[in-house]
Structures are given as structure tokens and as C-alpha cells.
Amino acid sequence: MSDDLHTRLNAILDRLIPGNPERDIPAAGSAGVAGFIEMSKAGDPAIAAEVDDLLSHAGSLNDDINHEDITPEFVRQLECDKPEAFRTLLRLTYMGYYS
């Protein structure tokens, strides 16, 4: 995965499961969930296709990869536009974060 896609994925992950600095709880991207997703993609071509399609679509909606630009509204748009791929990413996010 390119650095840009990895950064975009981490920004999305941080919106799916935000951190709580006051309680020293990291966000999903900061906790390394992207690595879990990469391992899942390597083991399943269908997962790889869905996640890659979602990240590509995210780039087509907004090619800026700053965390500030990945808003809750942006994530909701991804969910509306690519519901199946979004569900896959959300499931993997929860699995990676809580395992």
C-alpha cells in the first residue's frame, strides 16, 4: 500500500474509532489497525478488492489526505456510496482494534 493510501486509511480509521487522550485510549489508526487490515487483505482477495475500492473512492472524493479533511460527514458519504465495502472495513476495524 502506498504511503498516501496508508495515511488515508489511518485517517478514516481514526474517525471510525476515535481516541480519548484524557483516558490514554488511542484511535484505531494510531493503534496500528491498518496493519491488521493489510494482513487481512493479503489473506483474502475479496477483502483486498473491497478495501482498495473504498480507499480509491475516498481519494476520488477528496485527494487531500490530512486527518482534518477526513470528517465524520466524509466517512458517512463513503458508507452511503460503497455500503458493502464500508461494512467490510468497519468489521475489520473492530476486529483489529479489539483483538
Image (cartoon, rainbow, N blue to C red):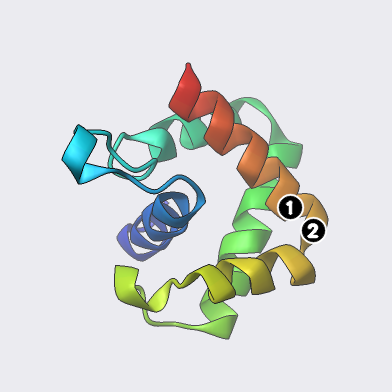
Q: Is mark 1 on a helix, strand or loop?
A: helix
Q: Name the residue under label 2.
A: 83
For label 1, count other residues whose C-alpha is less than 10 Å away and answer few (under 14), some (14-19) or many (20+). many
- Name the residue located 64 percent from the left edge and 61 percent from the top edge: 54
Q: Residue 68 carries which label?
A: none
CA distance for labels 1 and 2 = 6 Å
Find residue 24 and report its image quarter: top left
Judged by depth in the image, the label closer to the viewer, 1 or 2, is 2
Answer above or below: position of 81 versus 45.
Answer: below
Q: How many labels does the image show?
A: 2
Q: Residue 85 carries which label?
A: 1
Q: Where is residue 69 in the image (x, y as percent from the top left)?
A: 38, 78
- Name the residue located 30 percent from the left edge and 34 percent from the top edge: 31
Q: Is residue 73 visible in the rendered structure shown here?
A: yes
Find residue 19 and report its image quarter: top left
Find residue 65 and report its image quarter: bottom left
Q: Position of residue 74 (x, y in %)?
A: 56, 74
Image check: 68 left or right of 93?
left
